[in-house]
Image (cartoon, helix red, strand yellow):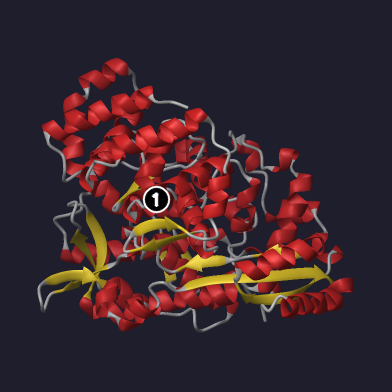
Amino acid sequence: MINKEEHRALVLYYLCDKHINIGEIDKYMYIYQKVGFMLNYRFKLGVHGIKSRVFSAYLEEQFSYGFVTSVDKKMSLTTLSLPNYEDMVVTKSEDGILDSVFDLISPLETDKLDLLVAADLLLTDTLKSHNIEALVSSRSYIESTLSNLCSAYTKENFNSVIAVISTLDKIQI
Amino acid sequence: MIIKDPLYGDLQFSFDESRLIKTKSFDRMRRIKQLSFSEYTYPSATHNRYTHSLGVCKIISDMYDSINSKHNDFFKSGDKELLRMMALSHDIGHSPFSHASEVLSDITHEERMLDILKLEKDNVVLNNEYNIEAWDLINQVYNGEGLVYMSDPRLITLHSFMDNFIDADKIDYLIRDAYYCGINYGNFDRHDLIKYLTLIRDTNGIVCIGIEAEGLQALESFILARYYMFSQVYFHPVRRLYDRLFISSMQGVLLNGVYPSEIKKFLQWDDTKVFNKLNFLTDSKFELVYDSDFDMNVKRVVDKKLGDYLLCDTPRKSLFKKDTDDSIIYVEDKLLNRVVPATDLSPILKSIEYANIHKLRYYAPSKTSNQLKEEIHRLLVKEDLL
């Protein structure tokens, strides 16, 4: 499966099947894009965390067509989408990664998930603009930025999310 | 520099701002209509992105002044100038016929904005404390990304002046579009809405734009204006039809069906160039043969039997995003010393919290429209969908 539309539907339906909290769905999308699903979303950091205009429009469309729903903020598939989801052709690699990423991320509380995504955004931007040596030497700068952005920031939590990010970096489709 | 505006009177721009306004890239926005093909329904709706950008600059200034008068310890020197430059730049990367063109591009207009600001960098002047180029800072704050942006939470708040439930872009385009279309229900109390804006700290400690309780009615009128404008103007059947025809025609004209990614070639495209390439508006005659609230069952049935003969359109818009923080605008109630979501205080906003505009429309060529209208009706009766 290499089609962007198919990957978008697959990841969204998978997460709905897992009944994730609607407030966290953008972050999960970010993470699944990071591990190689071809979602082609561009994420920006706003006052309420990361979001993607294209993903928001796609999600709204899925709600409008009755393919997904949310009850008490928990996402679900519907009778219209469930058969489509069950018929999706998924490779063994994609299937394995969907589960392994979910198992890794889902135990995290919301504020730690925020920290994880913010940390990854910051690290990725630093690497993009500079290099690995700059990344290492910028650690205190990165930590102070995260402490401003995320209520869950502590040195301990930061080290935990770095470990998660390292694991995610090894998972690639 | 002073420019007269029919909505706001005299607009004043600094020397640095006028340098950007006088660039060819900014000037190009005179030839990009704000409302695409809406002038075929509302003939006076010929205003352009140039005047809209100037208007947004004025609105963002008013927002800043209002909020700064209450929270002057939050902002730093240079913030207002940054906001104004952001407002001027925000639409500079738009394709011809605005949002109708988005499917004809591999690159978003926000990404093009970066390329254009870099191209015009000698005329993009903004002193800043971050020791980065002005174009880089404006791009980072507007697009909500980048190292400098993430390093200073205050910049995240500044970003929300242009990307929020209430933001300068929405305020100007609603007022401007209603004015030029000549319709009244797009109006709302701009002065009160801006007057009562304030800053509220959310649970993450991020400072976001909220509204004081005295501004609740202005907020209600703003949201209702948005609803009316979407249902009456932006989703008007004639405009939507022309958008669809435009897209399919342009896909035949553009190399690989998309606008050029190279910025100088892209900047050659404006509404005038499009009209020189296409004459589809006089050649194609279509009529609306079905228009109702979206129903997936209807769509399935009609698409299956008659899909080859019809043009389908499904415009949709939610006023609030479902159950997400984006849907929350906070109200500061000083009397009771609390901060609550606006929907908790306003029965009107509560009742439209899940309001959705979602239509299902079919168009057919004029020659066969009567026949197809009857066919659709017959089909829906047979399937018990009417």
Q: Chain ID for label 1?
A: B
Residue B175 pos. (x, y %) = 47, 73
Identify which amino acid the numbered label 1 is placed on: Met
* x, y percent for residue A166: 30, 24
Q: Nearer the viewer, residue B4 or B286?
A: B286
Judge whether residue B141 can be spotted in this image. Answer: no
What residue do we see at 61% from left, 66% from top?
B296
Seen from the viewer's position, the closer of residues B243 and B275 is: B243
Which residue carries the number 1 mark?
B85
Q: On the image, which quarter does residue B12 sit in? A: bottom left
> Would you place residue B204 above or below residue B385 in this image?
above
Q: Residue at x 56, y 70 (%)?
A: B358
Q: Nearer the viewer, residue B72 or B255?
A: B255
Viewer-proximal residue, B345 or B261?
Answer: B345
Quarter of the image for the N terminus of chain A: give it. Answer: top right
Direction from residue A55 to residue A106 in the image, left or right: left
Q: Residue visible at 74% across and 47% down?
A: B251
